[in-house]
Image (tube, rainbow, N blue to C red):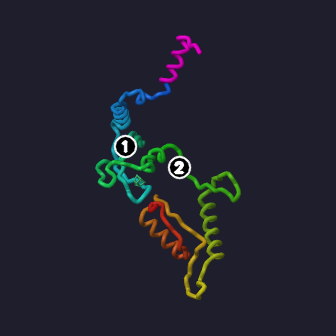
Amino acid sequence: MEFSRRGFLKIAGAGIAGLSLGQLGFDLEPVKAYAFTMKIEGAKEVISICPFCSCGCNTIFSVKDGKIVSVEGDPDYPVSEGALCAKGAALLSMHGEGHRVTKPLYRAPYSDTWEEKSWDWMLERIARRVKETRDGNFIAKDDKGRQVNRLEAMFQLGTSQMDNEECALSHQMLRSLGVVHMDHQARI
Ligand code: SF4
């Protein structure tokens, strides 16, 4: 197979374009560091805590013109020493790129689409379903006649967005219904 000079250059150019500069042997670390400095230049640093699990890694939020422009691990935090796992590293995109669900969404049984609902509609439905489930499944006594007052037909998984006090309230509410199966995402 023969190549013209122009054809050869086109193929070679496409090949080189398909390689990153890093693959071609250039050290990109100084460029990356400079690009990051540009991004956070003049930004205010706010120390916060990743909410996604009980490790509670410190984070540094850089805020510029009222907007979060960067989220990094905090090197001064002794537990994680500046590292963030994939969840913590995704904090910026969780905050600013429209992935977050901000309205109640409902998917009817056997449906493949989500419908937007009001909070009133959603809370009323949740309350009704909880009551129906409890009324239909509450176990007052076990098979030996002992009083147990428990509900095994419901399970609750807490979110790592809840603080200690919210967890305590949620726990008390579920225990008052007799729920015995519960866990928390922050423990996983
Ligand atoms: S989710 Fe990851 S970054 Fe966040 S606190 Fe837990 S370990 Fe740290």
Question: What kind of element bears circle 2?
Answer: loop
| Mark 1 surroundings within 10 Å by alpha-carbon count, few (fewer than 14), some (14 through 19), many (20 or more) | many
Image height of 10 relative to 121, above or below? above
Residue located at (44% from left, 62% from top) = 187
Horizontal relation, residue 71 to residue 181: left or right? left
Amino acid tagged 2 = Arg
Nearer-the-camera pick, 46 or 136: 136
Q: Position of residue 136 (x, y in %)?
A: 66, 75
Question: What kind of element bears circle 1?
Answer: strand
User: Residue under circle 1?
Assistant: 62
Instruction: Read off the magenta span.
Output: 1-16
User: Residue under circle 2?
Assistant: 100
Nearer-the-camera pick, 74 or 100: 74
Horizontal relation, residue 24 to residue 151: left or right? left
Q: Position of residue 11 (x, y in %)?
A: 53, 19
Q: Is mark 2 within 8 Å of ligand 1?
A: no
Amino acid tagged 1 = Ser
Q: Residue furthest bottom?
A: 145
| Mark 2 surroundings within 10 Å by alpha-carbon count, few (fewer than 14), some (14 through 19), many (20 or more) | few
Q: Position of residue 117 (x, y in %)?
A: 63, 55
Image height of 163 relative to 101, above or below? below
Mark number for residue 184? Answer: none
Image height of 131 relative to 185, above or below? below
Main SS type for the magenta part? helix
Horizontal relation, residue 137 to residue 57: left or right? right
